[in-house]
Amino acid sequence: MGQNGHNHSHTSNERRVFWAMLLTGSFMVAEVVGGIMSNSLALLSDAGHMLTDFVSLALAWFAFRLARRKADIRRSYGYHRFQVVAAFVNGLTLLAIAGWITVEAVRRLVDPIEVLAGPMLVIAVLGLLVNIIVFAILQTGDRENLNIRGAALHVMGDLLGSVAAIAASLIIFATGWMPIDPILSLGVAMLILRAAYTVVRKSGHILLEGTPENVDPSDLRDQLKAAVPEVADVHHVHIWSLTNERPVVTLHAVLADGADQDDALVAVHRALEELFGLSHATVQLEGNQCPDDRPNTKASETAR
């Protein structure tokens, strides 16, 4: 994606997160009131989830705003990585929410609380409509962006919570069986837990400078040598990501005898972008010996 395309996608994602944040925050108050009035754990857990959604969406929106800032001397890559930090924090909050719902559900199974099905049903239906709108807004954004994905998973948890609350209220209406409220809440907690694990794993992998899942360093070495005849060997390959959409690579390329350095450098960069989508590459060209493999002269003299 070109710079203009990336900027357009970035602005579009930021706008979607902003509207999702406003809708979520606006309805959260009504759901808190409804949950307290009806004594519904399903509603209260969904309201608590919507509160963290509002905070996480605000954090995601701030991350997009911060990423606009240009690189400086102290942050040569700019502020793009903050998006990944936001996604990681969102994933951790999802894990905490799932834990709280689980503990509260078990407590209510042991000591059931009467739930008012009428107010619960009204609030749950309204919540479902709001969550569907917010989820649709986020789904039209960049699905490969971890910040958008983390926010969308938060809202998906809310949507499932609303569905569970509707189902629980209807069952209570029909049978009066109160344990259905915490039981369905447990089901939602398990789904949230699975989604949270995915976000934490992917964002944590990027924060630890892990190799992108779609790039194999060994395969890169082989394909690069095959695509660029001037390159005799490739080593010291390091691939990581600033964000999920911005992979970065550094490598050493040993040139064949008689190869033109300028032509080889251009060919290596072209091959990296065309074959692997690696547009940000730092390539060190070498002759017969890698400077990193030479003995340290000062260390050798000290050892004598």
Image: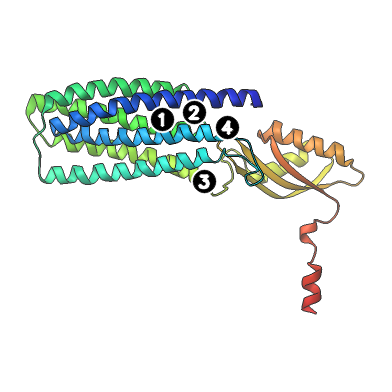
Residue 213 image-quadrant placement: top right
| Crowding at mark 3 (Cα within 10 Å: few <14, some 14-19, many 20+) | some
Residue under label 2, please give it: 143
Sequence-earlier tag: 2 or 3: 2
Write the residue at 39% across / 28% down: 21
- Give the left or right position of residue 99, taking residue 250 as reference: left
Residue under label 4, please give it: 68
Q: Which residue is at the far right?
A: 258
Q: Are marks 4 and 1 in contact (CB under 8 Å)?
A: no
Q: Amino acid at mark 2?
A: Arg
When the figure is inspected, residue 169 is found, relative to residue 75, above or below; the finding is: above
Sequence-earlier tag: 1 or 3: 1
Please tell me the numbered disc located at residue 152.
1
Q: Are marks 2 and 1 in contact (CB under 8 Å)?
A: yes
Marks 4/2: CA–CA distance: 20 Å
**Residue 51 x/y as whole percent:** 31, 35
Sequence-earlier tag: 2 or 1: 2
Q: Amino acid at mark 3?
A: His
